[in-house]
Image (tube, grey):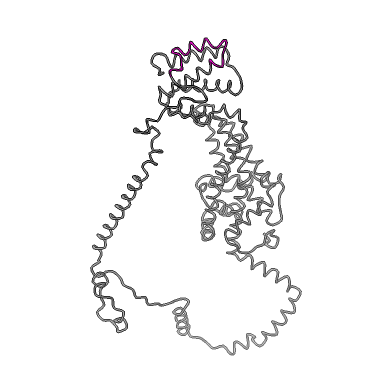
Amino acid sequence: MRLSDASVVIRPRTAWEAMDLGVLMAREHRLLLMSSWAMITLPVFAVLTAVLWQYPSMAMFLFWWLKPAFDRLPLYILSKALFGETPTVKQAVRQWPRLLKGQLLASLTWRRLSLSRSFVMPVSQLEGLDGQARQKRLGVLLQRNAGAARWLTTVGVHLEIGLWFGCMALFYLFIPQQLELDWDWQRLALAPNSEGLWLEHLGNAFYALILVFWEPIYVACGFSLYLNRRTVLEAWDLELVFRRLRQRLSNAASLIVLVIGLTLLPFSPHAMAQEAKPLSPQDASQSIKSLLDSPPFKNPETVTRYRFGEEKPATKSKAHADGKLPAWLQALLDHLNGNNLKHLGQGLEVLLWGLLAGGLVLLIWRYRDWLSTFVSRRPSPGPRATKPLPTQLFGLELGTETLPDDLASAAEQLWATQPREALGLLYRGLLSRLLHDFNLPLKSADTEGQVLARVHQLQQPQLLAFSDELTRHWQNLAYGHQLPSAPTQQKLCSEWRALFSAGGTP
């Protein structure tokens, strides 16, 4: 490589300045980096999704695990673009299979979880080092900027998670309100069957699109850290200065050689040989020894300090006598030998642990009411359990005295002439049963979805299925003016009798 052809200014930078340079490099070639990344990663993601459709988590894990193989393409593009040889998208994609040949197994196994992956990847891919040579090279490079590389990976993980949550939230905001009313997010997220697969694959697709934007920036920041470290180690900036100086002085080279020759003429070898004096081996050894005993090879220094258990010196100079410790302090230091210090340390340890335990107990007791809200979801006994039950929900009367004894028969009689009142009677009866028979803590401000979430906590599948179906038909009628079909009407009344006949519990 020719440093004079570099498209960036070669100079030593701090780690954070180097990563800023990486962001600028990625921004300059963003179309090339993002398009080439999408062309190789999205087809792989599509294949993994199709093959592992029933296992979306496994598909996402394999795609995430293959990131080091994908990262080799943006590193190749940036290394070429640095010296003015920017490839096209077609050339870069064609080059990617060749880039996978070197040390791919190591990148996907024991090196996969390295936090310095983006920083050390150029050593294997660009320098082609492996084995002991690679370890020696990393030992030099990681002496500095290793912490910045680890922070880059840590921040990158949190950024990916934040962008993923942002995409999911944006998707939720674009859902029409009428369609949103028919969704039960808790049931979709916890569904054990294929009902929730599409939602998981949607989240996987959002993550794949996020990597199209973020991963080239991550690779560029690691590459700029690597360049900055080599600039410091190999003095690339000084080399560029000398090259420019050589170009300036190339025209006057012959004149400089002539001047140097005339200057060194009095110091010809014949004249120097006449003036030189022989040096004996003893004199040479003495000269070397005196040189090694003086700074910077040797810096003798006398340090005096107190040590526990150190014997009192037999004699002291007058200079030390002026700085003598008080008798009580000297006696205390003499008393604190090894065993006494051990017992004292154990006592302090017990005291500190006791203070910590006492502080935790005091903290829990102080905020016991606040913690009880998160520890248990069951209503606590006492005055709070005697709160009056709501008499209305969604404008429907929930008192047992307002409902007929045979609610299913009354609903069957109303279907023909007053279907809205019939369906409302069934839904009102369900809410009344949940409130009085199952003691669900329903509130006047609860929505249909919140009622279903509380029914889900009862862990009664038959009751949950009936409540879900009845709520869906109630919402279709209330918001969409859609009546259930005749078979559905008879099915709802039959399921009501099966659930709430003879005792009121399923």
Residue 138: x and y in percent read 53, 57
- The residue at 59%/31% (across/down) is 50
Image: 363 above or below 502: below
The quarter of the picture where the N terminus appears is bottom right
User: Is residue 18 inside the magenta stretch?
Assistant: no
The image quadrant that residue 432 belongs to is: top left
Residue 36: x and y in percent read 67, 44
Image: 168 above or below 83: above
- Magenta stretch, main secondary structure class: helix
Image: 169 above or below 6: above
- Seen from the viewer's position, the closer of residues 250 and 368 is 368
Residue furthest to the right in view is 251
**Span shown in magenta:** 400-422
Q: Is residue 173 toward the left or the right of residue 379 in the image?
A: right
Residue 62: x and y in percent read 54, 38
- The residue at 44%/79% (across/down) is 293
